[in-house]
Image: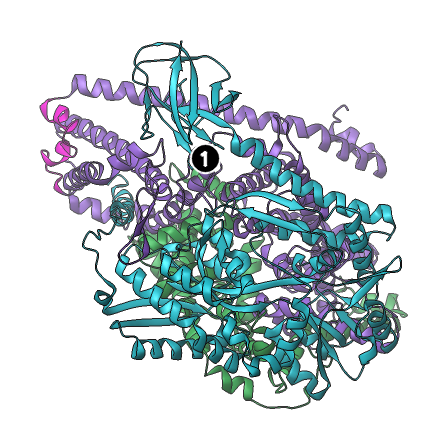
Amino acid sequence: MKKVLAIVLTVAMVLGLAACGGGKTTPTNNSNTSPSSELAGEYKALIWCPSEAKELTTKQIEDFNKTNTLGIKINATVNEMSESDAGTQVLNDVSAAPDLYFFAQDQLARLVQGAGIAKLGEGASKTITENDDKAAVAAATTGSQIYAYPLTSDNGYFMYYDKSVIKAEDLGSLEKLIAACEAAGKNFSMETDTSAWYIASFFFATGCKSEWTADSQGKFTSVNDTFNSPEGLIAAKGLYKLQSSKNHVSSSNVSDFSANPASAIVVSGTWAYNDVKKILGDNMGAAELPSFTVDGKTYHMGSFNGCKLLGLKPQTDAKKGAALNQLALFLTDYDRQVERFKTLGWGPANLKAQQQDAVKSNAAQVAINAQNQYATVQGQIHGSWWDIAKVIGTDVKNSDGSDAGLQKALDNYSKAINELFQMSDEVLKAYTVIGSINGTNWDTDFPMTEVSAGVWKSNDKMDLKAGQELKCRQGKSWDVSWGGNANGDNLKVEADGTYTVVLTITNDKGIVTLEK
Amino acid sequence: MAKYSDLEYLKLSKWDKFLYKLGRFFISIPVGIGHFFQKIGKGIASGVKAFGRECADVVNTFKNGDGITKGTFLVMGLGNLARGQILRGLLFLLFEIVFIFYMIFAGGYWMSMLPSLGKQGPAVEYDPVLDTYVTAYHDNSFKILLYGVLTILFIIAFIYTWRQSIKQAKINQEMRERGIRLKSGKDDLKSLVDESFYKTLLALPLTGILIFTVVPIVFMMLVAFTNYDGSHDGYFNNLFHWVGLDNFNTMFSWTGGNKVYSATFGEVLTWTLIWAFFATFSNYFLGMFVAMMINKKGIKFKKGWRTILVMTIAIPQFISLLYVSKMFAKNGIVNGFLLDLGWITQPLPFWDDPTWARITVILINIWIGIPYLMLIVTGILMNIPADLYESAKIDGASGWKQFTKITLPYMLFITGPYLLTQFTGNMNNFNVIYLLTGGGPTNAAASGASGSVGYTDLLVTWLFKITTGAESQYYMASVVGILIFVVVALITLLVYNILPSVKNEEDFQ
Amino acid sequence: MSKKNDYDPSAMKQHMGMSAKNRISNTVIYIVLVIMSIVWLAPFVFIVLQSFRCESTWMVGYVVPKQWGLDNYINLAKTDFWHWYTNTFIMALATAVLQTVIVLCMSYTLSRFRFKIRDGLMRFMLILGMFPGMLTMIILYRILKDLNMTQANAVPGLILVYIASSGMGYYVSKGFFDTVPKSLDEAARIDGATRAQVLWKIILPMAKPIVIYTILTAFMGPWGDFVFARYISMNTPAGMNVAVGLNSWLSQDMINSRYTMFCAGGVIVAIPVTILFMCLQRYYVEGVTGGAVKG
């Protein structure tokens, strides 16, 4: 029996797989659109939230089921997932991703680009713009499109300190704080080796900026970055003061307060409030970040003012999408944000909720509000920036502290930032010809050059045969591509010959033609 | 360097012998590589020849075949069915039917889409009544590539089976003409537990390897020639497409551009090799040393010592290594302990300084590795014939001499292949690096390359970081994966082809 | 090697000074071994101590808890821990059985049969083994997803992945079979036994050490897999193993409240594996030395 058995088994496996993969997903047809009262029904939904919020979120969904007037019943499964990993996990497989998920705002652009998050409708966008603070709206927006529902607006950092070590009069000055720590043999924890988020504090202090612009597709189009500047050098000097202290620890975990040697200061955020309280008890202090002095001038350390957001996965069923939209709005409304603050200590993004007395009197909220005067609204930042900027920390630490050494760190930084955009500009803007031409099969790009505004010509003449098809595309990707007619269909070659391929773009529409 | 005869070699002084061996080793490198390519060339040539023969045989079979044999060209298994081999015939026929149905209903689609990897991406539409956005998904580049690969494998399998069916039709025809009894289905089944028992035994393992190793590897190699990444995931956002050698160009920048990838690759590769070397040999010699200490006559509680060391094998690394990693942090208990003792005045930068971090991971790896080596060496030491030592003792050899003359050569001989697998295994030692340092401290020079490479990153952790990084550049991960393969393969080839044949398989039987 | 000293009386007489020297060297060895034992055991002792620590948060500057208690172990029941534990246990058992069958099939065949594609097959598998496994994570996820074996169904999916390619790890047990004399097979074949009977009745009973070695290594695998299992289970508690579940407690937002529980969970995970390993250590050594170095 010639290997038949082995083959049959193999075939069975192959078929099993192929059969499963055979079916194409057909788009859900929603021609019979219905008014919102017709949303009534039961919907299954998967929801991810951080572990501490699991219980409360489950309860709030039940509240929604009980109180909503539209007859929507959400049958929810709530799983734990930290906000900082949610984006990555969602994009691993969007189809298996949760319908609603809590995430930190730095992942928004990536989620938009990866199509792991749905656009908000007009009604929802209006609600959010009206009710939430500016930083929160900016956090949920890329280009001009709102993509997420703001949950909190306190995702920034400030300083927790041990009152038994740090005296109140030292609080305003970084130099004094470092000296106090060194004198007491205690550490100063700020995650400036490995996290751009914290490093930026020094640069914002001196007025440096790194402002990124993203379009509505989550693609970054430009940056206004002034980290490599005289002000940046001052910031680097301040950073070096901290980095070069033998008592500096690069960490943002508040359990440093109980480590050995223990820290007397940890720069962290509101989320750590309960843990610090547990460790330090009455000795807990919270304050805005200090100022540092370079060449006789003082600079108050800045911070990011960031948000936690609730994201909705793109839906194929309009009714379910609309129902989940209702749930998301409910979970982020005034009452729910207040409830979340009371139970979890999460600072609200809702303007009205921020005015609550309880919110105003919480030590961590007081500190973050004080710090927020010096904070920069985080907005959208290129995903690679975090990797590039965190290197400043290592570079500054390993330098000798001289102007030249610090300047080198900034040069490295701006070089990497420029490379990020050189690629974008040159490669992303250029058009190329692609098709079943020159013996290739839609797998090779032939370069083109812009001969005049909006007119691109292929660099070489091409031998084309009748029946071959081609298109022009931008940035070697299919995001933007033009064909032989207004619909963008492939251009078919009519007759054999040697041609130059010409792309003419007028009013953002391109047409490909052939020139003998 | 001339080659000496045995007699000449024996006359050399010790030092000269060593130099001679070393010289021969380096001379043999190009020869070894040459041999290797020769082998490949020969293999290809003989493959082409064999293919020619097969084709000729098919043509001849058709010419000389009777109606049934000719019919088998169209209806597989006819040559078996018509001549009484019902079981075989039915299986052939079934395979053909399944194949045809598959190709019509699924395979054809996948094959037709393979060159473009999909034409229509997803579309988002606004539903004004419900004030919500709805996404309609269309082509799936990922599935097209995956099932395209599977379909190609299926087609190859079909051609092979078709060929077998014809071959059997021919044989059956000849045997019938000569009046020899054909094997029945019963005979076939019987042979599966006897002469052909190996087919039964291999069927399951090989199927598993095919589906879960071969297909994924082929797929991921193909990904290196596409633009598959986080924002071209082939289904949910944008389709991905073939990009030729673009990604390899990014890696090696042969058409210019910044050399950040090639520089990063060089740096990571260098550290990977250094790490693999030290991790392998430090464990090897120290493990041997520990084993010999425990095995020394007169040492009590042998089993107890061993058990204590072996605990590290039994406890999952994600628990022990994460803890150990934190022990060495700047405010971890090791530094705390040393500070309290007053031995140091400021914390040691175990993980903060590149050199410190590299040395620390190697040292901690010794902690992990010694128990394994100790177990293995213990076993081997027990197997060294005792009379070797007896005679050495009579000759008055010292302990050290016995070690260098008997133990070490014996160990090296027996464990040669093991050392090689250890070396390549350490190159891909993901757990230790990932759990201890996560690749850090960050390497500023490599910041332009995807994945934010650190000073202790190995190629394999870099690959992981690219995959899970901000842009999920699967295509670059794939390029790095292919390069890891190339490096490992080259090292293995060098060792196998150049060192005197480490072992002869049949010798042990 | 030190076999020289003890059992040869003539050697003893020749080197009367040996005995004292021997005592010194033994003392040195004892000291080294004690220090090593401390270094090797310390992390585990520390982890066990942490698991009894009632005062919370992640890092504390001391090793011995100030407040002892079983809270961490009791609180585990309030999480999905025991579910993950059961999952892992099922995976470990299934993997141990199936992987052993597959590895034995593969290694026995390659050791005993000589067939046309054998050398090519072995070389092919050697080459396959040179690709980093990490590379295939994404695609394996998609394959399993199409088989509906991810997320909540990750347990069968992971078992499938663990065993599917285990045939490639045939080296050690093939090395063992190579040392079993072929004449045994031949004698039985002459007596009319089929190949299958030879394997079942003659070889397997002799292969106890290698079978146990294979079972042991296969059983230990699933307990430590946190990268792959995380990808396949996609944050669905029903499909997680202990490594993934426990690791999720180490994220920044959970570590301070769950770290001591992580240690408690770690201790519980380590118990079955350690006990099994201690009991079967002898076979592990036999398996490794019988196979690894010759395979």
Using the image, determine if residue B377 lies above or below residue A144: below
Instruction: Give the quadrant of residue A178.
Output: bottom right
Chain B rendering hue: purple
Residue at the image position 39 percent from the left and 77 percent from the top = A60
Chain A rendering hue: cyan
* Foreground pick, B129 / A173: B129
Q: Within 10 Å of the Cα at label 1, are there few (<14), some (14-19), or many (20+) other Cα atoms?
A: some
Q: Which residues are magenta?
A: B66-86
* Foreground pick, A161 / B476: A161
> Label 1 is found on which chain of the structure?
A
Q: Is residue A379 left or right of residue C168?
A: right
Chain C rendering hue: green
Residue at the image position 32 percent from the left and 16 percent from the top = A493
Circle 1: element type: loop
Mark yes or no: residue A356 visible: yes
Q: Which residue is mark 1?
A: A477
Q: How is the image coloured?
A: by chain
Number of numbered discs visible in the structure rendering: 1
- For the N terminus of chain B, the image quarter is top right
